[in-house]
Image (cartoon, rainbow, N blue to C red):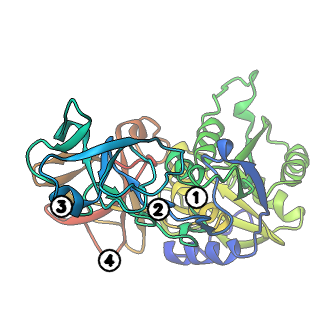
């Protein structure tokens, strides 16, 4: 297995195989307080319990009256009192007006509201339009104009944020059924990670992947195997894979004598879904499965590891959580040419600069799969398929590197 790249698959084939595997990974729904729901994914459609507004209400502080009565009263109408939000008003007395505050229920018999600053109040307590009488029905928010009772407020798979919390709170909803966060274990390995190694290297992949995965709404546990000992690696992988939905490894999957990850997973009963993808960077990417549990074996080079996580791992996680697997792409116009290698899909870090004629895509210089700094300079990833080279002036669609877009 270690040295086999004979069955390498195309990029879309790999994505299809991952999507099929994701269908067998199931995570339960849990109930969380609404105040803690931001970042969680709705486990079911959420319906309105009541219409909004629940009744006809005033859109402003002012006066409520019958339009025809005001039109027929040159001296205005006497003010019979005031209605505040939260009180249930009595019907409007014939031939009179009522002061009304924003959000207060409209009294029966009233069909117009005017702002206080557009009205004149006489010393005798009569109110009339200061200039022009508003139209009948003006400044009234009608019952159900925002949404009706039973309307779908949020669809299953929606990742909740402050906007959704406000929407559910207005319905008096205090608990929400959400998808339990996908549990992911990240395992880095290699003798170079040992602090006392003669050529010790810092582990940048684990923190990077943990940040990326937590940003996606998962629970992450980190493991490190700072050795090339296959037995110790197998023991740690067995421990890491217990109780999680997804195992992610980084490094140890190429063809070297110390690349033991795939053999170790095979020894734990995992079967290969695919071994290698025709992409640059990230060719060694391998996915394995043991029942419904998946292992994403990412390359050790940080640039390749990041790209494989963005392009292959995150769509799998979204699918498991009931979301659209593929993130939204954004358009831009390339200012460069790029010809891909035959039969290889490339992923290029690009900078996206908004301009008068839209977003300009510029290719960033990179040293290849090991490059880390290029991702702090890039804000999107451009996929280039082997049959579609990039030409200057061409509109291409890119994957933003940040969840809030470019």
- Please state which of the two labelled residues, at mark 2 or mark 3, is closer to the viewer: 3
N-term-proximal mark, 3 vs 4? 3
From the image, tell me which residue sits under label 2: 327
Structural distance between the alpha carbons of marks 2 and 4: 23 Å
Q: Secondary structure at mark 1?
A: helix
Check disc 1 and report the residue beneath it: 314
The label nearer to you, 2 versus 1, is: 2
Question: How far is mark 3 from mark 4, CA to CA?
Answer: 62 Å
**Which of the marked residues, 2 or 1, is nearer the chain's N terminus?**
1
Quarter of the figure that contains the N terminus: bottom right
Q: Label 2's element?
A: loop
Q: Position of residue 354 (x, y in %)?
A: 20, 47
Residues at circles 1 and 3 in contact by the CB criterion of under 8 Å: no
Alpha-carbon span between mark 2 and mark 1: 9 Å
Image side of residue 136 versus residue 34, left or right: left
112 and 215: which one is in front?
Answer: 112
Asked whether the residues under the numbered discs 2 and 1 touch, taking CB atoms below 8 Å apart as contact, a structural biologist would say yes
Which residue, given by chain and number where applicable, does mark 3 sit on? 135
Q: Quadrant of residue 280?
A: bottom left
Going 56% across and 45% down the picture, which residue do you hit? 301
**Label 4, on which residue?**
387
């Amino acid at each position: 297995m270690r040295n086999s790249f004979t069955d390498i698959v195309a990029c879309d084939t790999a994505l299809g195989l991952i999507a099929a595997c994701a269908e067998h990974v199931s995570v339960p729904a849990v109930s969380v307080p609404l105040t803690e729901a931001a970042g969680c994914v709705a486990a079911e459609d959420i319906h309105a319990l009541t219409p909004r507004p629940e009744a006809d209400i005033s859109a402003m502080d002012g006066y409520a009256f019958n339009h025809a009565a005001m039109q027929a009263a040159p001296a205005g109408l006497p003010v019979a009192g005031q209605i505040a939000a939260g009180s249930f008003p009595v019907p409007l007395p014939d031939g009179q007006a009522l002061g009304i505050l924003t959000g207060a229920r409209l009294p029966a018999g009233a069909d117009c509201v005017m702002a206080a600053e557009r009205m004149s109040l006489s010393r005798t307590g009569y109110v009339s339009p200061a200039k022009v009488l508003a139209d009948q029905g003006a400044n009234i928010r009608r019952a159900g104009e925002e949404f009706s009772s039973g309307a779908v407020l949020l669809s299953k798979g929606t990742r909740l944020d402050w906007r959704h919390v406000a929407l559910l709170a207005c319905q008096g909803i205090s608990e929400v059924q959400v998808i339990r966060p996908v549990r992911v274990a990240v395992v880095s390995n290699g003798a170079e990670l040992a602090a006392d190694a003669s050529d010790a290297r810092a582990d940048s992949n684990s923190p990077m992947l943990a940040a990326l995965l937590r940003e996606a709404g998962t629970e992450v546990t980190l493991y490190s195997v700072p050795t090339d000992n296959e037995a110790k690696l197998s023991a740690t992988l067995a421990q890491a894979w217990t109780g999680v939905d997804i195992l992610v490894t980084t490094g140890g999957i190429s063809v070297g004598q110390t690349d033991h990850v795939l053999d170790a997973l095979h020894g734990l009963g995992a079967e290969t879904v695919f071994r290698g993808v025709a992409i640059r960077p990230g060719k060694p990417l391998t996915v394995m499965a043991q029942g419904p549990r998946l292992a994403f074996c990412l390359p050790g080079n940080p640039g390749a590891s990041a790209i494989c996580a963005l392009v292959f791992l995150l769509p799998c996680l979204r699918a498991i959580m009931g979301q659209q697997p593929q993130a939204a792409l954004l358009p831009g116009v390339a200012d460069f040419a790029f010809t891909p290698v035959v039969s290889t899909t490339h992923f290029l870090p690009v900078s996206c600069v908004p301009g008068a004629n839209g977003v300009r895509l510029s290719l960033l210089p990179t040293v290849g799969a090991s490059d880390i700094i290029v991702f702090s300079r890039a804000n999107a990833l451009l996929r280039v398929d082997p049959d579609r080279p990039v030409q200057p002036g061409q509109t291409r669609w890119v994957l933003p590197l940040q969840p809030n877009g470019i």
